[in-house]
Image (cartoon, helix red, strand yellow):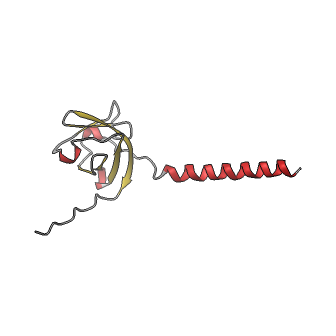
Amino acid sequence: MKRPIILALAGALLTGALMADTAAAKGPPEASIPFANHGSIDNWQPDGRDALYVQGLGRQWYHATLMAPCQDLPFADAIGFETRGTNDFDRFSTIVVRGQRCPVKSVVRSGPPPKKAHRHG
């Protein structure tokens, strides 16, 4: 009689732990920048080769993580934003850097990019 109770209790604990891990792994909710095809992206700044900050309407900043490193992103003067039939820049979009297509993995609201450290000569 004790064995079924112990198994049921162990199953309940395992299910609870898995649900907690899933909730923690989700992170901030996905976002999108509306009207990206109509000039609503005001600014952008690379965050290494794997991500970038994008400023949309109302001076709101977003952090876009890429599916794979985009090699020339840190050195680019200009980039393109492909929204694939919608007007929104979101996790289904792509950035184009010097001819390289870099698919977006995630877009979340964020604060502005960190300020660069000043070099002292």
Q: Residue at 43% x, 46% y: name it.
A: 30
Q: Residue at 17% x, 43% y: name it.
A: 78
Residue positioned most to the bottom: 120
Quadrant of res 89:
top left
Q: Residue at 27% x, 45% y: name it.
A: 40
Residue positioned most to the top: 85
Quadrant of res 93:
top left
- In the picture, measured across the screen, residue 22 lies left or right of residue 6, that is left
- In this rendered view, identify the residue nearer to me: 83 or 26: 26
- In the picture, measured across the screen, residue 32 lies left or right of residue 40, that is right
Q: Position of residue 50 (x, y in %)?
A: 31, 46
Residue positioned most to the right: 1
Q: Is residue 118 above or below residue 89?
A: below
Q: Position of residue 105 (x, y in %)?
A: 38, 41
Q: Position of residue 94 (x, y in %)?
A: 31, 36
- In the picture, measured across the screen, residue 101 lies left or right of residue 11, that is left
Q: Residue at 28% x, 57% y: name it.
A: 113
